[in-house]
Image (tube, rainbow, N blue to C red):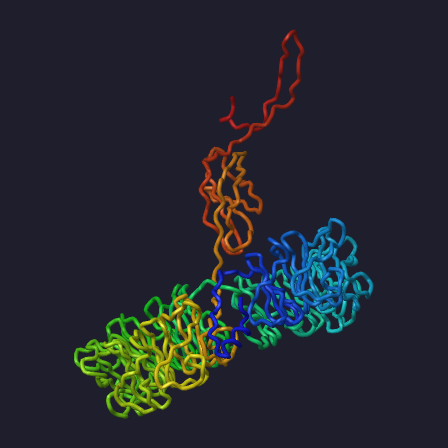
Amino acid sequence: MIGAATMSAAMTAGSAAAQPQVTPAVPVVQVTAGQAHTCGLGGNGRAYCWGSGYYGQLGNGGTTDRLTPVMVSAPAAGVTFTQLIAGTDHTCGLGSDSKTYCWGSGGSGQLGDGSTSSRSTPVAVSAPAAGVTFTQLAAGYGHTCGLGSDSKAYCWGRGGAGQLGDGGATNRLTPVAVNAPAAGVTFTQLTARSDQTCGLGSDNKAYCWGSGGSGQLGDGNTIDRSSPVAVDTPAAGVTFTQLTGGRFHTCGLGSDSRAYCWGSAGGADGPSPVAVNAPAAGVTFTRLTAGDLHTCGLGSDSKAYCWGSGGSGQLGDGNTIDRSSPVAVDAPAAGVTFIQLTAGTDHTCGVGSDNKAYCWGLLNTGQLGTGGSTDRSSPVAVSAPAAGVTFTQLTAGRFFTCGLGSNGKAYCWGRGGGVNGSTPVVVDAPTPGVTYTRLAAGGYHVCGLGSDSKAYCWGGGNHGQLGDGGTAGWSDPVAVDAPAAGVTFTQLTAGEEHSCGLGSDSKAYCWGSGGSGQLGDGGTTDRSSPVAVDAPAAGVTFTQLAAAGERHTCGLGSDGKAYCWGSGRYGQLGDGSVTDRLSPVAVNAPATGVTFTELAAAGYHHTCGQGSDGKAYCWGSASSGRLGDGGTTDRLSPVAVNAPATGVTFTEVIAGSDHTCGLGSDTVAYCWGKGASGQLGDGVDLYLPAPVAVSPFPSMPAGPQPPTGVTAAAGDQQVVVSWTAPANLGDGTLTGFTAAASPGGQTCTGIATTCTITGLANGTAYTVTVTTGTTAGTSAASDPSAPVTPQGVPQPPTGVPAAPGERLITVIWTPPLQIDESLVR
């Protein structure tokens, strides 16, 4: 995988190097954070790290910072990881071979291999004692700790503040035992950061030791401790289920599924625990990890969230800014692709293959639809417009976005288009019973094609761009005047302050601002009702229109040529000149024998089109690299956009104000041009003159298969169920099996491949099915077992004396108090 910083640098230099192929989806099952780096454990058992790599703490064999995840080198052939922990500048992991491995800075012995050398790939930690392995790890600034298979805690590395817990202040290059926290109490979980260590005791109390100057030990004091001391209770009745520590703070997961932090920074401010804000509505935490000045948690929605300092990319969201509340981390790989794109002034949106809308870029007016107020440099999901409603098409204005719902209704968010909000709101129906089939957004207005073949517009109307004969703005749709008797609209497009439509008579009509000739009727007058665009050439009609930018419009002719009109100051009309045109002029051919198959909604000062050779072509202003040819020189005629990847062509191209995006034949989205607000979606904020792949979307992991070979053995009011575990658990890890009896629905659960269903009726025939539960979901039910009927088992007789006789004995007994008469023989 090529890091985002490296890729961006190459593109900034105009390189045409092929982009990497998108890898299969890898779900995140655990996250851990260091001072300026973060790591995640994938569902495939591989480790991924991002952020600072100066000491080799990313584990990929290099020392380069990364803004998006890179894979850690395997510790040994065939060995994967089961748990990760990150120290300030080093990382450690439990291997599938029961060994512990560490990498990164080793100057204080924190790698545990008996040396003080730094490592850029994993090395094995020395065993703590004969026959003892580690079951859990914790790492600090210059020290590491592990929970042994003997339930003892061991630490190694820097010990000057007492953080090794052995009562001393000496560095250790191999593991030493930590003092017991209290009589009879052992540790069930450990965490370490900076110069302090904490552990969860078998009495459900939290204990900390080491540096305490910022209150990070949680005992209400600010003094160092060389042996464990108890942390204050976070809230009435709440105990801790998991702990994690930062440089000057510590956090714990409460029994109420809330996160609590104490100390200084990372969401904490004081020597006793305080509650952290929820990552999202209805989402709680299932796991926490803390860096020096930031903290991360795994949410109940299986997403990773981080907050705090982000200066080196350690929050994993593709940015280098601080966060005061949790934000989602980019997935290391994904499986959701784009099926449609649209671009606004400084933001981009797309419909995913999961029919959800995703947006990224500038978020100053709510135009990303997330309900928040932070720019994004990687795609984020738009809030659902309504229960069960997905998006089928998107269109973006200057500072707003609109989407066509699967229910035929229009939804808008941001500022403009008749709305002012950060999540989708429904647009009123134009008339009872009429839905929308297509939407087009201008600078501050929107037009929609109704199911009755009429056009409707709403939003700003100061130049007549709503087409209703006036110049008033409307927050509800108004009908556009008919372009001619008996003529309806078949397609719409919208510019900054004007709109155009393709009539059922194959003529083009425009209305709104006309000062630069963008209405194409030979004049420069604003029009508040549709006027016919002059014919581009004798016998040529229009098959598609593209109107955007401030003052120009383009159309695709029935002869396969592109025609443009309006302002030509930057060459955006493509006729080889910088002259304004009041009527359509032919765009120069992009290449010999190549015609246009589609035109992009034109940018403010540039235009793009899809060639019959599968290439994308752009012309006009090249500022910010928006033409995609690797340079920044204005072009008066079409130039080919650099190929996004080897063998990849474009199937769709769209243009924003200062950037352009295209959908590749590999179903990957690519963008180029201005990226200062993250609108290129590649995880960085650079200006790129050639296409770069948009960061992949998160996807749902594959679910497990059901168990096989289900059998049930009858007992008294119960059945014992056995099965064979499925060969494929999908992308999740096993959480347990559930066996269910029918009729009745009684169940039993467990991790083992057998359990007993109780509470059944004797004499009733039951069948049993079993499902597999994993972190990725629950499987379908297995094939049912053969019918099985529980039966009462008779009790043995009592008081049986034996009377001896010649060759015989006489036996006398007392019948049992309970007997199932159906079984009497």
183 w.r.t. 211: above or below: above
549 w.r.t. 423: above or below: below
User: Given the current orientation, which residue lies at the most extreme front position?
Assistant: 592
Q: Residue at the location (30% across, 73% down)?
A: 597
User: Given the current orientation, which residue lies at the most extreme top position?
Assistant: 806
Looking at the picture, how far across and down is residue 736, in whole percent?
55, 49
Looking at the picture, how far across and down is residue 379, in whole percent?
47, 71
40 w.r.t. 377: above or below: above
Looking at the picture, how far across and down is residue 77, in whole percent?
61, 54
> Would residue 298 appear left or right of 547 to someone viewing this image?
right
Looking at the picture, how far across and down is residue 460, in whole percent?
35, 85
User: Given the current orientation, which residue lies at the most extreme left position?
Assistant: 485
Q: Report the number of discs.
A: 0
Confirm whether residue 460 shows in the render: no
Confirm whether residue 19 shows in the render: yes
> Would residue 682 appear left or right of 648 to someone viewing this image?
right
Q: Residue at the location (66% across, 65% down)?
A: 120
Q: Nearer the viewer, residue 250 or 173?
A: 173
Q: Nearer the viewer, residue 241 or 777?
A: 777
Q: Nearer the viewer, residue 409 or 597?
A: 597
Picture quarter containing residue 578?
Answer: bottom left
Q: Residue at the location (75% across, 55% down)?
A: 128
